[in-house]
Image: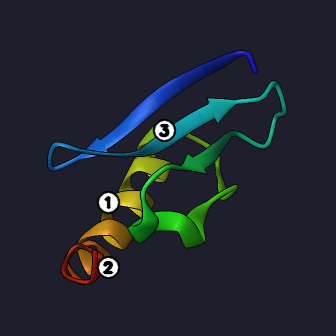
Amino acid sequence: MLDSKIIEIDGVFLGTAILTGSTAGLRFYAAHESVRSLHNAVEPDLAGLSRQVAQHYRRNGTQAQHHA
């Protein structure tokens, strides 16, 4: 692992964007159940990955919190 950035949305830690050295971009390591389906997703940049994670969390996060 070369570098990583925390992805936190609305004060909730959802996971980490990991730069693996590949030209493919950043790989997402999901730490929150609401975004688990995005685990290992790859995006070319942090902004795109963060946007995808935020959309997924906001769509599924409320449901996951009610089931916890």
Give left or right: position of 52 versus 39.
left
Using the numbered discs, state the Cα–Cα distance from disc 2 to disc 1 in whole angstroms: 10 Å
Residue 62, by quadrant, is bottom left
* Sooner in the amino-acid sequence: mark 3 or mark 2: 3
Q: Mark 2 highlights which residue?
A: 60
Q: Nearer the viewer, mark 1 or mark 3?
A: 1
Q: Mark 1 highlights which residue?
A: 54
| Rendered position, 68 above or below 28 | below
| Rendered position, 3 above or below 19 | above
Q: Position of residue 56 (x, y in %)?
A: 38, 71
Give left or right: position of 60 versus 6.
left
Give left or right: position of 33 versus 41.
left
Give me the disc on residue 46.
3
Q: How many marks?
A: 3
Mark 2 surroundings within 10 Å by alpha-carbon count, few (fewer than 14), some (14 through 19), many (20 or more): some
Discs 3, 2 touching: Cβ within 8 Å: no
Give left or right: position of 10 versus 34.
left
Using the numbered discs, state the Cα–Cα distance from disc 3 to disc 2 in whole angstroms: 21 Å
Q: Nearer the viewer, mark 2 or mark 1?
A: 2
Look at the numbered disc 3 and give the secondary structure of its residue.
helix
* Sooner in the amino-acid sequence: mark 1 or mark 3: 3
Give me the disc on residue 18.
none
